[in-house]
Image (spheres, grey):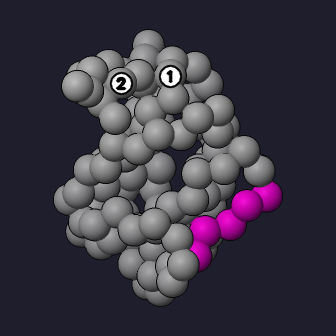
């Protein structure tokens, strides 16, 4: 039986995703789950990592559909690499927490 997702107190990181790969710090504490919410009108692609130099690929990494939300396990990862396809943009909200998986 899954435990409900509980967000941490560090808040949510807002990321403006573009067609240039970016790499953003995740909220620093509060559990091993991430709630990823794409409020943009385009899909975006992400890679969970601890490497500040990691890049994301619009052809090989995990997509988050426009208007979609995804709850994933992130372990001790500290970074998220992100990208949209050429000429596209999205707004991605990343909330760290516990449970829900």
From this viewpoint, is residue 16 visible?
A: yes
| Contact, mark 2 vs mark 1 (Cβ under 8 Å) | yes
Can you identify the residue that label 2 sits on?
Answer: 99
Residue at the (31%, 49%) spot, across then down: 70
Q: Is residue 37 magenta?
A: no
Q: Position of residue 23 (x, y in %)?
A: 65, 55
Q: Secondary structure at mark 1?
A: loop
Q: Earlier in the sequence, mark 2 or mark 1?
A: 1
Residue 12 in the figure: left or right of residue 61: left
Badge 2: residue crowd in 10 Å (few <14, some 14–19, many ≥20): some
Which residue is identified by label 1? 31
Q: Residue at x 79, y 58 (%)?
A: 53
Horizontal side of 38 relative to 92 (left or right) equals left
Which residue is outermost to the front? 1
Query: Residue 94 placed where, x, y %?
Result: 42, 40
Please report the residue visible at 34 percent of the width from the left and 63 percent of the height from the top. 64
| Residue 54 vertical placement versus 43 (above, below) | above
Q: Quadrant of the N terminus?
A: top left
Q: Is residue 5 left or right of residue 97?
A: left
Quadrant assignment, res 21: bottom right
* Number of marks: 2
- Range drawn in magenta: 53-57
In the image, residue 96 lies at what x, y percent? Answer: 45, 29
Q: CA distance from mark 2 to mark 1?
A: 8 Å
Give how far across and how far down residue 73 sits, in percent.
47, 40
Res. 93 in view: no
């Amino acid at each position: 039986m899954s435990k409900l997702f509980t967000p941490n107190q560090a808040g949510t990181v807002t990321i403006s995703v573009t067609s240039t790969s970016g790499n953003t710090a995740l909220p620093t504490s509060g559990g091993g789950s991430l709630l990823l919410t794409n409020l943009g009108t385009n899909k975006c692609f992400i890679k969970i990592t601890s490497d500040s130099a990691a890049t994301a690929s619009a052809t090989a990494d995990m997509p988050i559909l426009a208007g979609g939300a995804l709850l994933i396990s992130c372990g001790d990862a500290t970074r998220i690499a992100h990208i949209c396809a050429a000429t596209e943009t999205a707004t991605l909200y990343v909330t760290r927490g516990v449970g829900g998986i």
